[in-house]
Amino acid sequence: MPAPANNKNKPVRDPRDLFFHFRCTRAEIDVIHRNAAQGGLRPGVFVRDVALSGGKLRIVSRVDESAVFELRRLGAMLKGLYPKTANWTNEEKRRHWDAMKAVLEHADKLAGDAKDPAERGEQQGRSA
């Protein structure tokens, strides 16, 4: 049985004292390092978490929250700049809304809030 943790907020864990080795190519190592860095994890922790999750680990990129905030702010500004009284063609209106949606979708993707394609299709069908 593991010793009790010194800090009351930390969970008690079994010590990790065993090693598991495997062979892979240089390209595979590079992909592992790149994906681990994207998630802010060490490569060994990344591989262990992927293996223990059955390959269903969702990697959320650690992005500067201020960048996501600014993208959302820009999308809102584009929405506010839409001229309601202007005599725009339908194509110009569509391009304006598409640009606004692209900025907001990119912010959601960076923040990890992106919806899957089925949900996006559902929402587009409702709003049309």
Image (cartoon, rainbow, N blue to C red):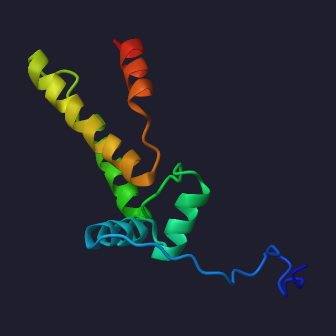
Q: Residue 113 at x, y = what percent?
A: 47, 45
| Badge count | 0
**Viewer-closest of 6 and 32:** 32
Residue 102 in view, yes or no: yes
Q: Is residue 66 above or below residue 92?
A: below
**Viewer-closest of 116 and 12:** 12
x 28%, y 44%: residue: 103
**Viewer-closest of 43 and 39:** 43
x 35%, y 61%: residue: 67
Q: Quadrant of residue 20?
A: bottom right
Residue 76 in view, yes or no: no
Q: Quadrant of residue 15?
A: bottom right
Location of the C terminus by quadrant is top left
Q: Residue 65 at x, y = what percent?
A: 43, 62
Q: Is residue 5 above or below residue 39?
A: below
Q: Residue 86 at x, y = what percent?
A: 13, 22
Q: Is residue 59 above or below residue 28?
A: above
Q: Residue 39 at x, y = what percent?
A: 45, 65
Location of the N terminus by quadrant is bottom right
x 20%, y 28%: residue: 83
**Viewer-closest of 35 and 107:** 35
